[in-house]
Structures are given as C-alpha cells and as structure tokens.
Amino acid sequence: MKHWLSLTLLTLLVAVAPLRSMAQDVEKSDLKFGFIKLTDCAPLVIAKEKGFFEDEGLYVTLEAQANWKVLLDRVIDGELDGAHMLAGQPIAATIGFGTKAHIVTPFSMDLNGNGITVGKDIWAAMKPKLKLSADGKPEHPISAETLKPLIAAARANSEKFYMGMVFPVSTHNYYLRYWLAAAGIKPGFYTADDMAGYSDADVLLSVTPPPQMPATLEAGTIHGYCVGEPWNQQAVFKNIGVPVITDYEIWKNNPEKVFGVTDKWAQTNPKTLVAVTKALIRAGQWLDADNGANRAEACRILSKPEYVGADYAVIANSMTGTFEYEKDDKRAIPDFNVFFRYHATYPYYSDCVWFLTQMRRWGQIASGHPDSWYDATAKSVYRPDIWRQAAVELVKEGKLSDTDIPTTDGYKPVTSDFIDGKTYDGHKPNAYIASFAIGQKD
C-alpha cells in the first residue's frame, strides 16, 4: 500500500513538474496592479477572477486608485507594479508633459467605451434643433453645432461654459476636444503660462475623476462631460443627464486604455511582463468570446464593490451590446466595448502617434517635430515586441490562433473613420496636424 501511494505521489509530482517550472519562471510572482473604477478595467479583473494570472504563476492584487494622477505616481514610485492607464499617460510621462518618467505599454486594453453626456437643461435646449428619424428619436451622430447658441448665451450673461474630462492627457480630453472643434468650437490651448488649457477657449474643460462625474454634473459645476462607462449610463439611470454621442461615433474603433509599467520595471522583469501580457490577452479573448456570451458574467463581476462597484444594470446597459442615450432610447452598438476583436489588444504605434498629434494640436507639446520624432517616440513607449512574444507562446499552448496575431509594421491602415471625415495616416503626423482648422500650426 505504501509503495503504491509513493508511486502515485511520484507520478503526480512528475505530471505537474512542467507546470510548476513554468509558473516559477518569472522574476516576480506577487504583484500589485492599480486601476480606476471603470468598465474598461475588465481585462485586469477578468485575468484575476478567471485564473489567467495564476495560470502564468502570478499572484495579483488589484487595488482601486483615487484618481489618475495618484495611480501614475504610485507606478512611478514603485508602490504599484503596473496599472490600467489612460493611453496618454505613458506617452506624456515619457516625453515629460507633467510627471517625467519612461513608461511603456505592451498591451492595449480596449477600443471605444466612452461617451459625452450633457445635463438635462442643456439637452432640453439642444433637442428641438436636432433632426429626428422616422421613429421620432434624434439622428446620430449628434454634432456639437447645437451647443453653439448655448455657449453664446452663457457668454452674453458673462458666464462660463464648463465641461468635464478625466485628465489632461486622457482620451476623453482629446475626443471631447475633437468633437467640439469639428463643429468650430474652440476648446482652448495649453501654454507655458496656462497648464489648464483655457487659453482662447469657447468651452472650459476641467478635470473630474470618473466616478465623480455624475455628482459634479448634478451639482451644476459642469454642463456636461466626457467619461468612460458606467458613468454616462449612471446619468441616465439617475435622470440627471443625457449621453449625446459615443466616442465610437467620433472615431470608429478608437484606442482606449493601456496597461503600463515603468521601463525600468520592464527591463528588470521581462519574463514577468510577458506572463502578465499573456494573461491579459486571454482576458480580452474571454470578454469578446462567442459574440459577447460572457459579458453578463463580466458585468456581475465588475459590479462587485472592490471593482467598479456600480449596479449590474448600469454596467450591463452599455457592456452587453447596447447603449442608452436619452431614457428609453436604447440602441444596439455591438462594438461599444471591444476587448479582443479587430486586434484590439495589440499596441499599435499609429495609436500612440495619434495621441501625440493631439498633444501637439492643443499645445501640450510646445513646438513642432519631424515625422521621424513621432515614430521614434511611439517605438519607445509602445512595445508590440512584448505583445508578440506573449501571443506566440499562447499559440504554441493552443490558447490563441495564428490569425489572432496581426501582420503589421505597427501602423494601422490609413483611416477616415472620424466624425469630421479627416484622413489619418500615422506615417504622416505633421500633415494630419496641419489639416485642422482649429489647432496649433507649425
């Protein structure tokens, strides 16, 4: 009997030995990652909850952060190993706009997922000017043109028209600016003497942390905001505001958050970073599997207080293939949240270059640079080489298909999928910047 038990134990040890060695083949196994309470933190949450981190020998603690600045500072200081970040944060930190630090990203967390919401009084003034479809509901996309009379009225009364965004280098800042400027509304410029970006502004854009957006709107401090979910849907549920446009309508399949670490951390823990990237790719795959079959479960997980902490119904209202604008105006937008389709997890250089063009357009980059500078900067921040190493390993393990790895030089094809019809070629950033009527000119 003892002999049989010894043989059985030996057999089990031999069987799990390869798994154990793989699990231990990382420089650091106990990790702490930060996130902000938004739907698009989902890849981190799912990688933890579904055991994808543990499959790579990683034991991860996820910790909600108060705001984006605190999150970035804690990554730089080493209190966090990495974090769910605004796409602009690694870029801005690396080029020295704000806190200076070399941050890299091997993983794009999602596409789309944001909206622009206005207060009910603003919506009541906008709606009569909108063209209606046969069912009596407003046609989309809605242009910011309908805001012009309201902005002019505020100015005539010596009042300021404020809108909220979550951080100066957030996608929300750039997409809100893009929407306004496409209608000829100036959202202000950043200068050496005006780091708030209010110079020559028709609309003043102020910073508010995402979970605080609905309350700030309700208090009347701002007239509207651009934020990720579930905080647009929260305004609908609380009957305090109306989402008027999604970022999908401003730029179809636009890049959103990234996973970021310091370059020093990446160099110190290269195997760990590949393992983290593998787990996150699998999480994105799970989130988009079978036409969203897992989204309801994802919404239940995200609704937990330690994660997003909003009601399941609020999260599901935009994460399960629909988006509600005005109350009872729910529409199908299957690509509102994309976590894996369209090679969503791949960190394209052209995404980084686009954000750099907007930083230059609005004055966060104070002077012009040649196209080669944009390319070199993108290649110092975005790390598709790490993503590709992780993906190749997943293919070998049978967890990913060859077709899930894009054939690319790191630049997406030229696109005109913007609300204003502008054409963007990531290889020609200066020509793109010059094409805008409103913006800095070199």
Image: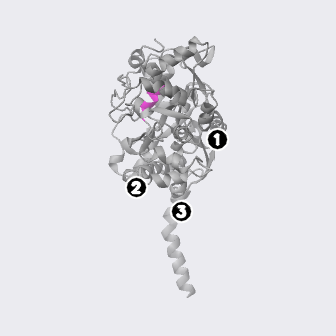
Closer to the camera, 430 or 124?
Answer: 124
**Res. 337 visible in picture:** no
At a point 51% along the width and 46% down the height, the residue shown is 315
Residue identified by numbered label 3: 20
The label on residue 334 is none
The label on residue 65 is 1
Crowding at dot 1, Cα within 10 Å, few <14 / some 14-19 / many 20+, comes out as: some
Closer to the camera, 377 or 43?
Answer: 43
Q: Earlier in the sequence, mark 3 or mark 1?
A: 3
Magenta segment:
348-355
**Rendered location of residue 79, percent (x, y):** 67, 42
Crowding at dot 3, Cα within 10 Å, few <14 / some 14-19 / many 20+, comes out as: some
**Rendered location of residue 408, percent (x, y):** 34, 36
Task: From this view, report whether residue 228 is shown above or below residue 160.
Answer: below
Residue identified by numbered label 2: 399
Tag 3 and tag 1, C-beta contact below 8 Å: no
Crowding at dot 2, Cα within 10 Å, few <14 / some 14-19 / many 20+, comes out as: some
At a point 38% along the width and 22% down the height, the residue shown is 420
